[in-house]
Image (spheres, rainbow, N blue to C red):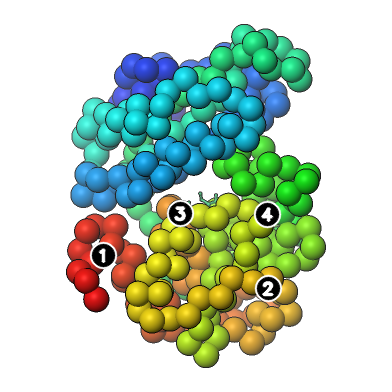
Amino acid sequence: YDDRDGWIWYDGALVPWREANVHILSHAMHYASSVFEGQRAYNGEIFELTRHSERLHSSAKILGMKMPYSVEEIDAACREVLKANDLVDAYVRPVAWRGPEQMGVAAQATKTHVAIAAWEWGDYFADKAKGIRLDISPWRRPAPYTAPVHAKAAGLYMICTMSKHHASDRGYDDALMMDWRGQVAEATGANAFFIQDGVIHTPTPDCFLNGITRQTVMGLAKKRGIKVIERDIWPEELEGFEQFFLTGSAAEVTAVREAGPWNFEVGELTLGLMDDYAKLVRGQLGNR
Ligand code: PMP
């Protein structure tokens, strides 16, 4: 990803893609003091841009990092990056991290650096509409008193990458992760939804990200008159669910046809919400 043409917004200015580097002694490299975002642009417009910029700010705040740019400045910089790279449909990746101004666990003297890159990124899961296959991760999401679970913080992705690799080594597309209690939490980069008898069930986001796509899709379901229940979900219940889908800015709405020993159909409701979401992000969803 580093050796290519293009522009990356870096601490307030556009720099050539190949020159957007960090020093090896950056605090973030050693202690995971980094937060990030991920959003998609459709037809040149970044979907829910301000909510993503606000979440970047809130993630930084949770980690005690001072953000040197306002939400409005981050919004503007994201748009600038799209334009500079001549992108219309793209993935946008803002990242904020503690720099090399201090070494050691303490980081009060570090500066928060911010960069934004964007690139073309097609479907996150090739089998999005056919249904993907999930492994059950051996790693559990940490408790809210063990890690800053509501920040989109780099450190929390260590177990996601390990779960993802464990899953792909076993021939799966991704992994479903339980939380520290053993309840169903989420996939490695997307939230989980289940359908039973026309009702949607989704885990309460008390130890993982309450995704922006998750909230959008809950709104779309309600618009269709579908009841959405947020509650504790135990893995044994997966047996009784008919449909299963994931949501995320990268994953969009992705159908799941298998999770560990359980199988699901790719039903009308999942496909309907997938279609609603695709239309909404492109501004094509009229009033129902
Ligand atoms: N959970 C995790 C672990 C994620 O990385 C993401 C993607 N940011 C999500 C859920 C979904 O969040 P969003 O819909 O805001 O992209």
Residue 272, percent across and down? 35, 77
| Kind of residue at badge 1 | Lys
Residue 167, percent across and down? 65, 59
Kindly report the distance in space between the C-alpha atoms of the residues bearing marks 3 and 2: 20 Å
Q: Residue furthest bottom?
A: 197
Kindly report the distance in space between the C-alpha atoms of the residues bearing marks 1 and 4: 30 Å
Quarter occupied by residue 79:
top left
* Whether label 1 touches label 2, CB < 8 Å: no
Mark 1 or mark 3: whose residue is earlier in sequence? 3
Mark 2 or mark 4: whose residue is earlier in sequence? 4
The count of marks equals 4
SS label for mark 3: helix
Quarter of the picture containing the N terminus is top left
Task: Confirm if mark 3 falls within 8 A of ligand 1.
Answer: yes
- Residue 207 numbered mark, or none: 4
Q: Is residue 145 visible?
A: yes
Mark 1 residue crowding within 10 angstroms, few (<14) / some (14–19) / many (20+)? few
- Residue 233 numbered mark, or none: 2
The residue where tag 3 is placed is: 212
Task: Confirm if mark 1 falls within 8 A of ligand 1.
Answer: no
Q: Identify whether 267 is placed above or below 5.
A: below
SS label for mark 2: loop
The residue where tag 1 is placed is: 279
Kindly report the distance in space between the C-alpha atoms of the residues bearing marks 1 and 2: 30 Å
